[in-house]
Image (spheres, helix red, strand yellow):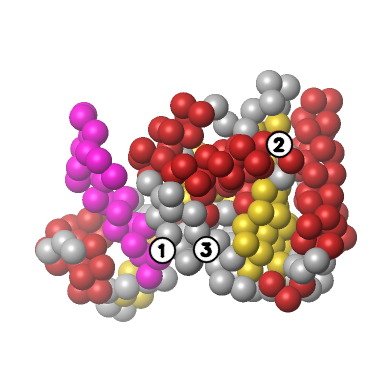
Amino acid sequence: MSEQPNVIQASITTFRVAEALKHLEGAGVTELAAHLELPKSTVHYHLRTLMQAEFIVADGDEYRVGLRFLDFGEFVRDRVELLDATDPALRKLAEETEEIANLLVEEHGRGVYVARELGERAVQTSFHTGKRVPLHQTSAGKALLAFTPRERVEEILDRHGLPSKTQNTITDRDELFEELEEIHERGYAYDDEEWHRGLRCVAAPIRDLNDRAVGAVSVAAPLSRTRGDRYRSDLPDAVLSTANVIELNMQYS
């Protein structure tokens, strides 16, 4: 990320330390310093700051993210208006497909999962509420981008690039825009092991009255259960139907 004017770099570092603690699921000063490539004295300074503000807790020589972040997360979740229109449609999608159903929105050029429901046969993945992902790596992210103005998509790519997650991830800008055109025409997007090996996803955008995506709903399932008609017609029909219900709920709620 490029440095911006009028930004307090010490504050940015503090947030980097907090994010690293989440990523590492707790760590000591030495491990954090190595992970962030910062001096141990600097890391210790920012840990003390986070401790004083009660955002992290100490467990012996290790530090971990504290419950105060939960308060912030629940506050933000309550203010996401789209969630009111999504429940119980997302739950019904998970029940009918028996897989993982997700709701994703865009913030700061990244995808953020804001809701998740598990069907009977849902597999364990690293998807969780609040998880941030590059938009081009997932079906939900691509569904969002396909119904986002071209200039905004260009801004997102300029800022975040096209990092690879698997060997199937699209890393070429022209190829991505070609796929976004196809998604726009058919109305839904695929993720064919582009975010995680052995996992396929299908997603549909949730659009406002101006035909711009305000979110996307997706179903994720293992490769073994996403073959033939289920992948090419059944799951697309399911996410399109769910997106349509959510759009109507948004208009008349």
Q: Is residue 133 visible?
A: no
Q: Secondary structure at mark 3?
A: loop
User: Magenta part mainly helix, strand or loop?
Assistant: helix
- The residue pinned by badge 2 equals 185
Q: Residues within 10 Å of mark 3 (few under 14, many from 20)?
A: some
- Residue 22 marker: 1
149 magenta-colored: no
Residue mark closest to the camera, 1 vs 2:
2
Is 23 colored magenta in this rendering? yes
Disc 3 to disc 1, how far (Cα)?
Answer: 27 Å
Q: Residue at x 56, y 72 (%)?
A: 197
Q: Residue at x 27, y 51 (%)?
A: 14
Circle 1/circle 2 CB separation < 8 Å: no
Callout 2, which amino acid? Answer: Glu
Q: Position of residue 137 (x, y in %)?
A: 52, 54
Q: Are marks 3 and 2 in contact (CB under 8 Å)?
A: no
Q: In this picture, is 201 found above or below 179?
A: below
Of labels 1 and 2, earlier in sequence is: 1
Q: Quadrant of residue 45?
A: bottom left
Q: Could you say which is closer to the camera, residue 143 or residue 47?
A: 143
Amino acid type of disc 1? Lys
Residue extent of the magenta highlight: 1-24
The residue identified by callout 3 is 168
Kindly identify the residue that appears in the image at 64 percent across and 28 percent down: 212
